[in-house]
Structure formats: structure tokens, C-alpha cells
Amino acid sequence: MKIKEIIVEKLFDTFDHTISLNTNERITLMLGENGFGKTVILEMINALFKKDFYHFQA
């Protein structure tokens, strides 16, 4: 099983992000200006794989 896409809605109550993962070359770049949530999305992915579901509580 492979993850093909990551969707984050209402990040900071403002941003909706859809990240299509490049499964062929296994490298995906996330580009964006400061404050758009790149680091937060990476922290969310890390928490998901560590099964740290408390990270997602509001």
C-alpha cells in the first residue's frame, strides 16, 4: 500500500493543501512561502506514523 496524496483542510483555519506524492521517483518537494504550513504538515505526517494521535487534538 502506498500513500499517493495528502490533503489538509483548513490549516490555521485558512489554508487547504493537496500534496500529490511522486511515487515513481519517491521524492516530493513542498514549496511555499513562510507561514503556509509546510513544517506543520511534516509534523502531522510524523505524528501519524508514530501513532501520536494526541498531536491532532484541537
Image: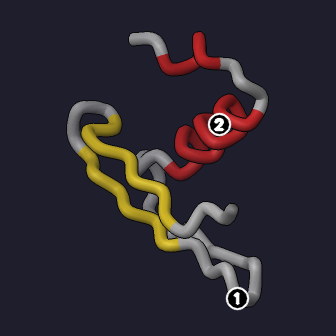
Res. 55 image quadrant: top right
Q: Estimate the x, y position of residue 47 in percent, counting from the top left.
A: 68, 29
Residue at the image point whose x is 69% and y is 19% from the top: 52
> In the drawing, what numbered circle is on residue 24?
1
Residue at the image point whose x is 23% and y is 32% from the top: 13
> In the drawing, what numbered circle is on residue 43?
2
Q: Estimate the x, y position of residue 32 in percent, counting from the top left.
A: 46, 65
Q: Which mark lies nearer to you, 2 or 1? A: 1
Question: Which residue, as the protein is rendered here, is positioned at the far left?
Answer: 14
> In the figure, 32 relative to 39: above or below?
below
Provide the secondary structure element on which disc 1 rests. Answer: loop
> In the figure, 57 relative to 6: above or below?
above
Res. 49 image quadrant: top right
- Tag 2: residue type? Glu
- Tag 1: residue type? Asn
If the image is split into quadrants, where does the N terminus sit?
Answer: bottom right
